[in-house]
Image (cartoon, rainbow, N blue to C red):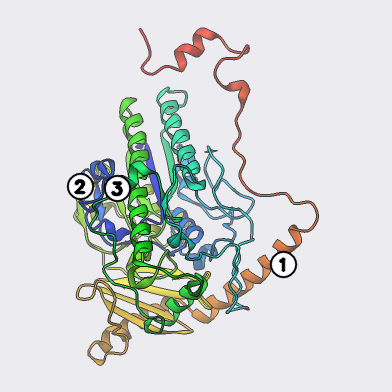
Amino acid sequence: MTKPNILIIMVDQLTGTLFPDGPVDWLNVPNLKKIAAKSTRFKFAYTASPLCAPGRASFMSGQLPSRTHVYDNAAEFASSIPTYAHHLRRAGYQTCLSGKMHFVGPDQMHGFEERLTTDIYPADFGWTPDYRKPDERIDWWYHNMGSVTGAGVAEISNQMEYDDEVAFNATRKIYDLSRGKDDRPWCLTVSFTHPHDPYVARKKYWDLYKECKHLLPKIPAMDYDEHDTHSKRIFDANDWRSFNITEEDIKRSRRAYFSNISYIDDKVGELIEALEGTRQEATILFVSDHGDMLGERGLWFKMTFYEGSARVPLMICNPNMEPGLVEAPVSTIDVTPTLAELAGVSLDEVALWTEGESLVHLGQGGERTSPVAMEYAAEASISPLVSLRQGKWKYTRCNHDGDQLFDMDSDPYELKNLAFDPNVAAIVTSLRAKSKARWDLDSYDNQVRESQARRCVVYEALRNGDYYPWDYQPLQKASERYMRNNMDLNMVEEAARFPRGE
């Protein structure tokens, strides 16, 4: 079997509700629409956990947070957990990462042979939530609504600087791969931080949405007391009482978010142009780590299982998978087994703890009946929340909150909780039994509390005295770049050119 090259394009906080069958028509994203036309598109793809680090660790390993123990944005991703980068590298691939993956801990590679940039977020335990202090709000790193009230135009920001660097390094790597210095197949992961808040965009993209008719949420903000208990904790964690959110704030925030999707589309275009210009073929996978509520119900950002936060775009362009729409619910933990099947890599040795399922057969007309599972155990929670999406039903359970059941066909905006409706009692009983068979919530809660307590002690200790950070420092070997006196100029010029001269 010929092993395909693989280009994984990951974005941050892009809601799948804007990708019902590829990008919605009104988004200015010609490059993503080009990819969508050639891809198997998954309408109901869900993150394993609606937060960056746990969602990404699950995406890379094919395991839920309860198994990876990456519960939040400051939980260590153990170096002993195999990722798709390990599996592919072991099978003979060169593996490379440009951009964000939010690895916490001293291992900042997790199977990647090469990493082209540092990460945008810290690698230590400083962002650890603490279930022992359920009412504590940690102002210096918690989200707040300033991202909404401060939305607007800027030509440079912390995140733009990062994604410009990510795209530059990734494009340069694609050109480098074309030179044929290494005959192994390759897997390049390019991971951007947009359209993650703050909602700030360059004017050229902002202007694309001047006449946009989608600047207000479909479900307006609700009164605080109308929300479920977990949503109330999200509001409190986001310090909502300190801000007066106006309709204009909402419009500007959503406009900037849409603008940044177009910004990312330009970056995707740069990657595709380099790939096509160097006549390289690759399987392309496009995905986000989680979504964004974008003001629906009054909620922003993520941290909830509601569709805006939990649903992500997922598209796979591969000749063994037919272009078209798959409506069966799937998960980001399905990516690792999918990549393994496409590359002809066996996961038999890790089958006992890999929880995802390959999606290749769904791109060949197959069916899926198993439920999709999600977990959340980070800020704005006081005990783990777990959810199952099976068929049209989404069922959520937590020790400290009431059950939730939504019929996603008749109630796509999740406004009517059916968990206590006698007309669907049999459905509730069945899903509750499946949930309890999968999760012991008391044990899960104990695991999270133990992890948090350990990390709090270690972080405080390591910040005393001399501090050695784990943040990844990209290595550049100046003596091996461009032209040096240990090189033959003629060979350098020939090897660095594609296509080569006669």
Q: Which residue is mark 2?
A: 323
**Residue 433 lies in what quarter of the image?**
bottom left
**Residue 438 lies in what quarter of the image?**
bottom left
- Bin the neighbour count of mark 1 within 10 Å (Cα to Cα): few under 14, some 14-19, many 20 and up: few
Q: Which mark is residue 109?
A: none
Q: Is residue 135 left or right of residue 416?
A: right
Whole-number angstrom distance, CA of label 1 to CA of label 3: 43 Å
Whole-number angstrom distance, CA of label 1 to CA of label 2: 51 Å
Examine the rendered structure and indicate whether residue 159 appears above or below residue 267.
below
In percent of width and height, residue 18 lies at 28, 57
- Bin the neighbour count of mark 3 within 10 Å (Cα to Cα): few under 14, some 14-19, many 20 and up: many
Q: Is residue 168 left or right of residue 40?
A: right
Residue 345 in sight in this render: no
Identify the secondary structure beneath mark 3: strand
Residue contact at pointers 1 and 3, CB within 8 angstroms: no
Identify the secondary structure beneath mark 2: loop
Identify the secondary structure beneath mark 1: helix
- The answer to which of 440 and 346 lies nearer the viewer is 440
In percent of width and height, residue 249 lies at 38, 62
Identify residue type, mark 1.
Answer: Val
Q: Is residue 286 left or right of residue 456?
A: left
First reached walking from the N terminus: tag 3 or tag 2: 3
Q: Which residue is mark 1?
A: 457
Residue 384 in sight in this render: yes
- The answer to which of 296 and 408 lies nearer the viewer is 296
- The answer to which of 225 and 176 lies nearer the viewer is 225
Q: Mark 1 against mark 2, which lies toward the viewer?
A: 1
The quarter of the picture where the N terminus appears is top left
Q: Which residue is mark 3?
A: 316
Residue positioned 49% across, 61% down in the render: 54
In percent of width and height, residue 57 lies at 49, 57
Examine the rendered structure and indicate whether residue 136 appears above or below residue 109.
below
